[in-house]
Amino acid sequence: MATFLAKIKIYEGKEAEFEEVSRMMFEATHRTEPNCRRYEFWRGAEPRSYYCLESFDDFLSFMNHQTSDHHEAPDFGSLLEEIELEWVDPIQGASDLVPTEPQELPADADELTRSKEAGHRVVMQAWWEALRVFDANS
């Protein structure tokens, strides 16, 4: 599984455009990506702040999302002043998602996938492992 929260800050005046692109991305992702478990956007408390929760069956499914036509088509980057990805690990018994795990790209991955992977590698936190043992014993 690959699950993260994205904290997003939009350029001033781009909120409506960002929300329209978010709706398009939400619809296309859920319609065409069977390995997507969560792909949701929320407005944050601060002006121009948003959050996105994304969860895929595995890292390769996330990479397929990153390189999909519907992800590449809108000029998403021109709307984003800042974006920070935080890989998260679902608490078993308090989430229906499975643990976040890193995964290597296949040897024949194309150049676009390799370039996306370089900026989106799964970051595992050491403290998760001890708690995962507790999850397994619960």
Image (cartoon, rainbow, N blue to C red):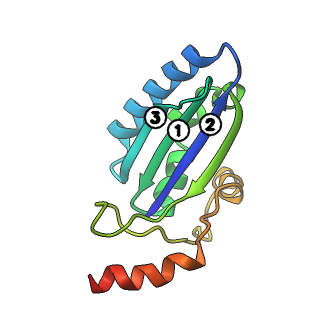
Please tell me whether mark 2 sits on a helix, a strand or a loop. Answer: strand
Q: Amino acid at mark 3?
A: Phe
Please tell me whether mark 3 sits on a helix, a strand or a loop. Answer: strand
Residues at circles 1 and 3 in contact by the CB criterion of under 8 Å = yes
Residue 27 figure quarter? top left
Q: Position of residue 130 (x, y in %)?
A: 48, 84
Q: Earlier in the sequence, mark 2 or mark 3?
A: 2
**Dot 2 corresponds to which residue?**
8
Task: Please report the residue visible at 67 percent of the width from the left and 41 percent of the height from the top.
Answer: 83
What is the spatial separation of the Cα atoms under label 2 and label 3, in whole angstroms?
10 Å
**Residue density around tag 2, few if under 14, some if 14–19, many if 20 or more, within 10 Å:** many
20 or 103: nearer the viewer: 20
Task: Please report the residue visible at 31 percent of the width from the left and 83 percent of the height from the top.
Answer: 136
Q: Position of residue 33 (x, y in %)?
A: 38, 45
Residue 45 figure quarter? top right
Number of numbered discs visible in the structure rendering: 3
Please tell me whether mark 1 sits on a helix, a strand or a loop. Answer: strand
Q: Amino acid at mark 1?
A: Tyr
127 or 103: nearer the viewer: 127
Return the mark for residue 63.
none
**Residue density around tag 3, few if under 14, some if 14–19, many if 20 or more, within 10 Å:** some
**Dot 3 corresponds to which residue?**
41
What is the spatial separation of the Cα atoms under label 1 and label 3, in whole angstroms?
6 Å
The quarter of the rendered structure image containing the C terminus is bottom left
What is the spatial separation of the Cα atoms under label 1 and label 2, in whole angstroms?
6 Å
